[in-house]
Image (cartoon, grey):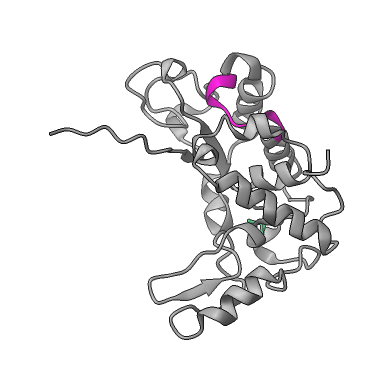
Amino acid sequence: MNQRIDLPTDWYLVQYMHTEAQNKPMLETKSNNLWCNFPNDIKDIDDIVVVPRPVRGDGRQQLNFTQEQLAAFRGVVIDRYDEYRSILPPKPYLDRLVKMMVDGYRSDRCYVPFFVQGVDNYGNAETCSCGGSMPMLGNVLENVDEVFNKHRSATNYDPDEKQRDCSYCMTQYEIMNLYVEGVVSKEDMLRIPSFRFGGVLDEVDRTGARLFDKGILTVSHTAS
Ligand code: SF4
C-alpha cells in the first residue's frame, strides 16, 4: 500500500559556470541551464524553495560565474524577485549572496557553527560543516559530553576570528544568520519547508536568544 509522507524538502543548488549556458538568464533556460533540468516550468511547482549557493573553495577558480552570468543572475533573482518569489529564499539572502559575489569576499559575521553541528562517519565533530579546514571539536563516540557542552556554551567558535574557509562562503544556513540578526522575518522563514518542521524554528530561536545573552549577537530577534 502506498503511503504519502509529507517530508519537508529543500534543494540547495550550487550555481556554477556552464559554457553552453553563458549569458543566458538563470531560472529561465530550460535545458543545459545553470540550475538544473527541470521537467516542467519550475514556477508551477508547489511548496519548493530553491536556494542558490556559490562555488566555494578551490573549485571557484574553474567554475565561478563570469561577470555576464553574474549580471544575468542578479537580473533575475534581485531585479525580478517578485516574479520568482514563490520558489526563492527570502530576498535578504539573495542580496547578501550577490553582494559577496560582486565583492569577491564575505564581509558579514557568521553564526552557523552555533546552529549546525556536522559529524563525520567516524564521530568527528566539525567546527563548521561548511568549513573543512577548521579544527575538529572532538569525537562524539569518545566523548559526547565534551562536544555537546562546547557547542552548547558557544565556545566552539569565534565569529570575529578570520577563518580562511569564511573568506568567500555562503550556504543555505545563511538564512538562519539573517533571521537571528532580525533581517528576515519569522513569516518568511516559514515559507521554507524545513523550517516548518515541528520544533526547528523554536530551536533556532532558543539558540539566537542564547547568543544574544552571551553578547555574541548584538540584536535580539525575539525581543519584539
Ligand atoms: S562563513 Fe561558511 S565556513 Fe565560515 S562559519 Fe559561516 S558557514 Fe562556516
| Viewer-closest of 183 and 80 | 183
Q: Quadrant of ligand 1?
A: bottom right
First to last magenta residue range: 85-92
Residue 111 locus on image (x, y percent)? 71, 57
Q: Would you say residue 79 sits in the magenta stretch?
A: no
Q: Looking at the image, can residue 62 be seen? A: yes
Quadrant of the frame with the N terminus? top left
In which quarter of the view is residue 8 placed? Answer: top left
Furthest-bottom residue in this view = 142
**Mark count:** 0
**Residue 82's spot in the image, x, y percent?**
64, 15
Left or right of 81? Residue 25 is left
Does residue 137 appear in this view?
Answer: no
Main secondary structure along the magenta-highlighted residues: helix
Q: Is residue 38 left or right of residue 81?
A: left
Q: Position of residue 200 (x, y in %)?
A: 55, 47
> Could you say which is closer to the camera, residue 165 or residue 174?
174
Occupied quadrant, residue 134: bottom right
Q: Nearer the viewer, residue 34 or 48?
A: 48
Name the residue located 48 percent from the left edge and 78 percent from the top edge: 140
In this view, 187 is above or below 172 = above
Q: Residue at x 60, y 44 (%)?
A: 201
The answer to whether 68 appears left or right of 219 in the picture is left
With 153 as the anchor, is 135 left or right in this view?
A: left
Q: Does residue 99 sit above or below 72 in this rendering?
A: below
In this view, the residue farthest toward the left is 1
- Which quadrant, please, contains the C terminus? top right
Residue under the image location 32 percent in, 21 percent down = 39
Q: Position of residue 97 (x, y in %)?
A: 68, 39
